[in-house]
Amino acid sequence: MTNRSDQLPRRFPPGFVWGVATSSYQIEGAADAEGRGDSIWDEFCRRPGAIKDGSSGEVACDHYHRFEEDADLIAGLGIPAYRFSISWPRVQPLGSGPWNEPGFAFYDRLIDTLLARGIAPHVTLYHWDLPQALQESGGWANRDTVGRFVDYAREVARRFGDRAASISTHNEPWVVSILGHEAGIFAPGLKSQKVAMQVSHHLLLSHGLALQSLRAQGCKAPLGIVLNQSPIHPATDSPEDLAKARLDDGLTIRWYMDPLLLGRYPEDVMSFLGADAPVVEPGDMDAIRQPLDFLGINYYTRNVSGTGAPLDPIGAGKEVTAMGWEVFPGGLSELLGRLHADYALPPVYIMENGAAYPDVLADGRVADPSRIRFLASHIGALADALEAGVEVRGYFVWSLIDNFEWADGYSKRFGIVYVDYATQQRVPKDSALWYRDFLAGTRG
Ligand code: FCB
């Protein structure tokens, strides 16, 4: 690590946005409260074996009832921005038709509570909890869902667009498409490359049409999308591994960046997909390429690609997190530099970065030095990217609190605040106190 922690704060410009992030299904709980409809994750969690510890988001962190305490936590740590997502089935139980006023009232209270504490609300429209009713008519594989999403986006923006600090359409369309519809390890648990690629097209299309529609409606909030991205490194420099790494780069990075910023899908990936390439209707690509007020990037690790057995980072002597993900801060500056070189980028926000570790609460304290090192080194890499000329405007730690980590259930703790699920007690970990002190340093 080249950056001394005590010098780190001075490397960021005034006005840089510092935050923490969460998502609706992972923290809210209150699955049956006040008219909320089922989401595909409620349904997926009921399938035996789908979630490692057999758990679900039914109760989660009970944030729905504890949002004021959580807002106090954010304020108490001096964190100026909070990214959260809206649960579509909470505000529109069937994904079409009537709005659920109590659901909207919850987000209304949340946003006002944040603003009253001086915390900027950054809203994500879709962090994976599709209304189950829409899945029953084909979900994202059905082109009609695009129109449903645009209606939902318009209603959220109409109500909250003047108070939201930003609105992101989608969180990590690659994960929705591939992990949900090809690998089948996330909701809705399908296993088809063809379906997955059609889903990715509909997600991108819904993003573009929503942006068009929100702008036409006069939405004041800056609008963007959030992509998960990792630099892809070839396992060796053999021609086969180089080709595989190039293809994986196409499937994970260029498949999203090219349509959003250049208005086309990468040709090498289209020809690799062959008959599994998505159906694209005339006008779709223009609709997808809308001006972005910002691009959100979630960064966790690098990926190593090759034709041989997958690299075992632990066996290879690499430092890993509890997810088994290699700790690789330099990948963040490398990724940002590459995107900056290849595309005319809008301002970038790192919308998620963080790590799971096997945290233990002992005597009222959680000592998590590995997470502190993780955060400090990645923030250092971010400073490097800024100095190299990439226009990065913000950084959000994933996550504010320990929460439901999808197929891993509650077995992985990403929070800078510990949650004792038996009592719902929140205990700031050492990393939260480190972040608090670091942020105090940025204020000079
Ligand atoms: C990202 C997700 C987020 C969280 C982190 C660990 O892919 O956006 O919800 O699960 O990973």
Image (cartoon, rainbow, N blue to C red):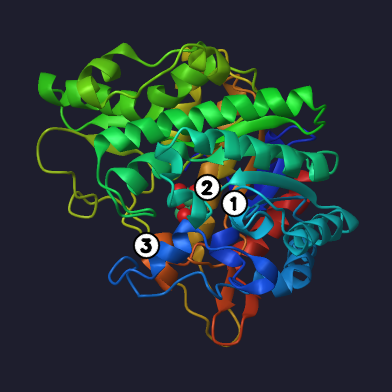
Labels 3 and 2: the sequence-earlier one = 2
Towards the viewer: 95 or 405: 95
Circle number at residue 397? 1
Residue type, numbered disc 1: Val
Above or below, 48 against 119 in this view is: below
Q: Which residue is mark 2?
A: 353
Q: Bin the neighbour count of mark 3 within 10 Å (Cα to Cα): few under 14, some 14-19, many 20 and up.
A: many
Q: Secondary structure at mark 1?
A: strand
Residue at the spot 29% in from the left edge and 72% down from the top edge: 48
Towards the viewer: 377 or 396: 396
**Marks 1 and 2 in Cβ contact (< 8 Å):** yes
Residue type, numbered disc 3: Ala
Residue occupying the far right of the picture: 116
Distance of mark 3 from mark 2, alpha carbons?
19 Å
Residue type, numbered disc 2: Asn
Position of residue 377 measured from the top left corner of the image (x, y, whole percent) = 51, 45
Quarter of the view holding residue 153: top right
Q: Bin the neighbour count of mark 2 within 10 Å (Cα to Cα): few under 14, some 14-19, many 20 and up.
A: many
**Residue at disc 1, CB closer than 8 Å to ligand 1:** no
Q: Which residue is mark 3?
A: 407
